[in-house]
Image (cartoon, coloured by chain):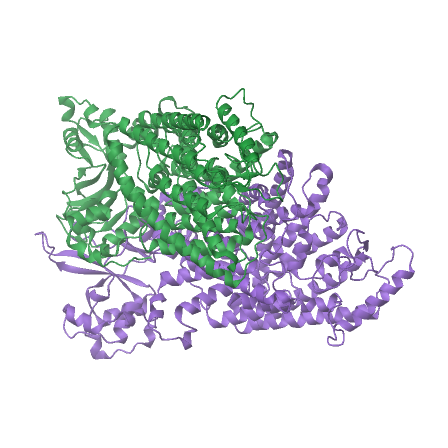
Chain colours: A green, B purple
Amino acid sequence: MEEESRKFTEADATHKMEGAADGEEIDPESDPLNEPLLKRSRTISSNALAMVGAKVSHIESLDYEFFTGFIYFTGANFLLTMSAAVLCACFAPTAAGPGIPEIKAYLNGVDTPNMFGAAPLIVKIVGSIGAVSAGLDLGKEGPLVHIGCCIASLLGQGGPNNYRLKWRWIRYFDNDRDRRDLITCGASSGVCAAFRAPVGGVLFSLEEVATWWRSALLWRTFFSTAVVVVVLRAFIEICSTGECGLFGTGGLIMFDVSSVTVRYHLIDIIPVVVIGIIGGVLGSLYNYLLHKILRVYSLINQMGRIHKILLSLTVSLFTSACQYGLPFLVKCRPCDPSLSAAECPTNGRSGNFKQFNCPNGYYNDLATLLLTTNDDAVRNIFSTDTSTEYQIPSLLIFFALYCILGLFTFGVAVPSGLFLPIILIGSGYGRLLGIAMGSYTDIDQGLFAVLGAASLMAGSMRMTVSLCVIFLELTNNLLLLPMTMIVLLIAKTVGDSFNPSIYEIILDLKGLPFLDAHPEPWMRNITVGELADAKPPVVTLHGVEKVARIVEVLTNTTHNGFPVADDGVVPPVGLATGATELHGIILRAHLLQALNKKWFLREKRRTEEWEVREKFTWVDLAGREGKIEEVAVTRDEMEMYVDLHPLTNTTPYTVLESMSVAKAMVLFRRVGLRHLLIVPKYQAAGVPPVVGILTRQDLMPYNILTAFPHLEASSKGREKEN
Amino acid sequence: MEEESRKFTEADATHKMEGAADGEEIDPESDPLNEPLLKRSRTISSNALAMVGAKVSHIESLDYEFFTGFIYFTGANFLLTMSAAVLCACFAPTAAGPGIPEIKAYLNGVDTPNMFGAAPLIVKIVGSIGAVSAGLDLGKEGPLVHIGCCIASLLGQGGPNNYRLKWRWIRYFDNDRDRRDLITCGASSGVCAAFRAPVGGVLFSLEEVATWWRSALLWRTFFSTAVVVVVLRAFIEICSTGECGLFGTGGLIMFDVSSVTVRYHLIDIIPVVVIGIIGGVLGSLYNYLLHKILRVYSLINQMGRIHKILLSLTVSLFTSACQYGLPFLVKCRPCDPSLSAAECPTNGRSGNFKQFNCPNGYYNDLATLLLTTNDDAVRNIFSTDTSTEYQIPSLLIFFALYCILGLFTFGVAVPSGLFLPIILIGSGYGRLLGIAMGSYTDIDQGLFAVLGAASLMAGSMRMTVSLCVIFLELTNNLLLLPMTMIVLLIAKTVGDSFNPSIYEIILDLKGLPFLDAHPEPWMRNITVGELADAKPPVVTLHGVEKVARIVEVLTNTTHNGFPVADDGVVPPVGLATGATELHGIILRAHLLQALNKKWFLREKRRTEEWEVREKFTWVDLAGREGKIEEVAVTRDEMEMYVDLHPLTNTTPYTVLESMSVAKAMVLFRRVGLRHLLIVPKYQAAGVPPVVGILTRQDLMPYNILTAFPHLEASSKGREKEN
């Protein structure tokens, strides 16, 4: 499925180009967009032949045809952006952005509503096609990850919420753990489809997305990416005759730089270290600025749908104007005589050395980078053995433009990935650095662009192993590996010393209670008992509870779990009677089920085992939550009883009240809990069996610091634990 | 460090060849081993010229010189094996074998004594050089992993046990977590050095070795392998003139098959699936047979050092005899005329198409595979575009021989890795399968050998992602990736349906209490309370305890942790007095410290805070354990008291007695515990605050089944949880 959507994306992405670059293989009659430009191009070409030298200021010669071309180009982009933005704003707001932070949060235990349904899936696919085709500075990688997760989730539950398949075996997947596994596999498959990097996909899930990991999951994700790669291969084979548009270009390796022999010596470690440091600084600066801009954007987006759409359209207009106008600023360059006429200049859908407004035998290097698909832009700037292709001003304009676009495009309400914009910025500065190094090093400028892209990715996203493998699979040059590793490590280290990774920043902005792997150091100075004392007292239910009390508790609290304890039981060992027994924890959903199904008893007694077997099935208990307001209980029923014992989870995880919050958090996160009961450290008659209950929200650093401001002081001088 | 040792290994590994293959670049005068063979070779060559046709039975012409050559060859191998075996048997028995299972167990929390010291390090380096040079069918990969871990451990603690550096900052690494991290980095570096596969090394640690994993560790291991790769590059550059022997052959990519263009279609999925299935079956068969042989070997090895050494020497003699004698059985083959005289036949230290006993213009294909270093054997059998190089009988002999050697060599008392023997077997059958496929597929026979090796590895070791990346980095052919993935997944799946992985088998054989990631299904049917009841009652100490009681408890039990509880305390909330307070858990080591340092009190009272600050330093507590027999306490002191409060860990992890063993095990393993306290679910006066204590041994399935045989029945029909 991903492959197909991907194919469409790429094919459609070329539409915008047909308005800009005049393709010789496109029939001018059939495509009205091309007509004015084609004429113009011919005019220029014949003019140019008459001229001596190539010093022609094309800005002055801007005339009617170029203006029409601009209108068509901008108009098409405008409409495509509008379709994507309208879809996102009206039908599935969760489809905007990359979706990766929400997936990361989901796998950590935080569910974002409407994230993995059919609506986000369709909007994401169509919207991503629209946004990428509109030439916006955004990638399809993040959206593909989200698409993969949506498909995985839908497959796991047997279809969209309202039209689920009722096959029995599907129910086996309908539990939290398998759903998490499926979504992890979906994320891997998405990365694999986006970069054609199967191992990179597995590692991306492992390093960035997943919270809990086990070896079974490792090979399951590996299996799913293997399937993706086989399907991808099959489609590439089917499309080898070229009828699928740009799909399949480059085969399984998207940005192949294996042709260049990497010759480097120990002395080359200096430029590599420089790239890493600059990448780290730029990456963290990018994170910082993006954070500020996303704050402003979120204010705008909150103002309503119209504002969301208008913001997207403004960005689209600005992008189109820059992409169309800026290439006129740079000088045409003569083609290298060693290249054939088919190679330089080119006018087709893809290809290096774009002719744009230049005479025959000349090319416009900035148009080569701007007026093409993002994938082709990367391919062109990564191209090796082309050290004279780009002029410094063109690269500077390219770099500056994509810095601005990369910052201002990401937050708009269309499906957008972060990978490609960062690769574009990074490759621009990498290539510039390569030119600046000049004859100091033998490393090809194309490789500098690759390393620059890698460094900025690591500086912003702070991944190492997965990026390394993704770049290896993208570029197919194993000899580049040592350099890539050093660059990634340096950029990550430098970036980490300034601010957190971009995904963590977005998680924080979205207010998702993500539970970190490491407790803050000041959490060692507070016990869970103190934390529980600062909260409202815990509500404990009896093993056989009155209906009225259950209704009251459910109405007055929003808790999702309640401890169940029995009073006055006789312990098996001959001890004093009147002991209290902690029976377990019961979920709000199960209490609601009990009320809904009216599992009431006339007298206060425990149910027998045969009654339990008759009454409850696991299908009933797996049902989704309702609301207490929807439950109808008569006055008579209010006086009846419910035996909670069969519905109780009798083996809850517990901590002593003297446990430090840091250690409780380690338990909470490692085991993957939703509720953690706090039991007293005192053993005596009259001591309540449970003194508190901890949830994810209670363990969020911000919430603890609000209740205990004195910890703030100690957290100021905190040291990073890892 | 690893690189240097590696260099020596490879350089020395060629000695055995010099006795077998006569190298033209070696001065015959300076090396007496070569003399007889060189003469013989010349004789044969001149004879051969006089002959018409090539049908000469070389077995009949076996004469004095070949016999001398055999004696020298076998003698040298014998001596090298003896040196390795004597070192292992006498100085560091832990250095025998690969060491990977013990490392895996260590990272799971099971410490094997004398595993990471200076003695195992030196013996492993020297012994591995000896064993590999002796031409035994074993690899240097496992030993390099162990060497890496030893170096990491020594660096972390500042040197060998008796000669430690006393620098203050080194102490910061001297804790369990950092030691584990360092050893994980060492393991990654070892794999990286062995295969020149940095990412493969990281993934190997992740998939096979490590039990607990966090993202900080991911990039630390990545950093260590990056350093290894830079050092490796530097040495390759220094050695580029060839003065380092075979080190550096192939550059960073050991078995390069990137020259062949991989053309495959969907139809080629059939041979790929077949390879996978056969690999899985063969791999599990290998595991099964190796298990049986290791059982027999362990009986022999237990009989004493002499038996260990004799066993190694027998295997060495058998190996040498086969390697020297078998090539005489096959016919000489004429060189392909398209190859230059320098390429075929070869006589040097390395190279394809070995001449051995053949006339000029002819080569012996079995000698090409047997009479060379193991690395070169792999290189030759992986070589592409050489579809006519090997005859089927040669490959059959090769395959059969290495199956036998691979089974019988592994258990002997020398440092030995499993990777290379399995690669050799797998490549043999892969190549045979390639020949059998004939014209059905376009896939090169060399690639069949690669896929065969991958399938057997997955079938025996059951790794997926790490093997995939290791093979990618070994062979530098990204287009092979989809096929490798499918082969690995199928082989692993097929293998898993027969028996566990080879490392798990070895762990089980060694009796190391490895804690699995997943509890057995029948563990849900038993509570920790029941488990605790089957054990001797828990020994609880008081907060302020009499010295006599501490001495008694330490003498009579072997427990490593004791709960500490206070009687008759008054809880802060106004409850009935006489409550019992669970204070925490105290370690045997700390009790011994208290006795050794004589932190005694004359009266029964709690120490003040200033006393604590004055008396205890963390350096005292970090000291290694002593023995209770070495503690001298006078009769007077026996009547004194120790305040255990400052020494107690006040925040132990606890579970309720109603918790199932399965869930307790999840907590135990995920959080990485050594002791788990069981607290009662009843709350009443007189209930003991702790009803039991769980350790790793209590949670081992075998031990539980011994105490509760009825669970066995339910475990019979158990279903695998993952």
Q: Residue furthest left?
A: B574
Q: At which x and y percent is residue B433?
A: 69, 44
Residue B187 visible in the displayed image: no
Task: Say which quarter of the image contains residue B276.
Answer: top right
Q: Is residue A340 left or right of residue B680?
A: right
Q: Is A30 above or below relative to B493? A: above
- The foreground one among A292 and B169 is A292
Direction from residue B645 to residue A64 in the image, left or right: right
**Is residue A305 shown above or below B580?**
above
**Hey, which quadrant is residue B77 in on the image?**
bottom right
Question: Which quarter shows the C terminus of chain B?
Answer: top left
At which x and y percent is residue A299?
A: 24, 35
B628 vs A414, nearest the viewer: A414
Asked if residue B720 can be seen in this view, the reply is: yes
Residue A542 versus residue B40 in the image, above or below: above
Query: Residue at image x 23%, y 41%?
Result: A583
In-front residue for pair B168/A273: A273
In this view, the residue farthest toward the top is: A30
Q: Which of B104 and B695 is in front in this view?
A: B104
The total number of labels drawn is 0
Relative to B384, say whether B581 is above or below.
Answer: below
x then y, percent, for residue B451: 62, 46
Q: In this view, does B233 lie to the left or right of A113?
A: right
Identify which residue is drawn at 87% across, 55% down.
B54
Give how far across and how far down residue B208 sits, in percent: 48, 53
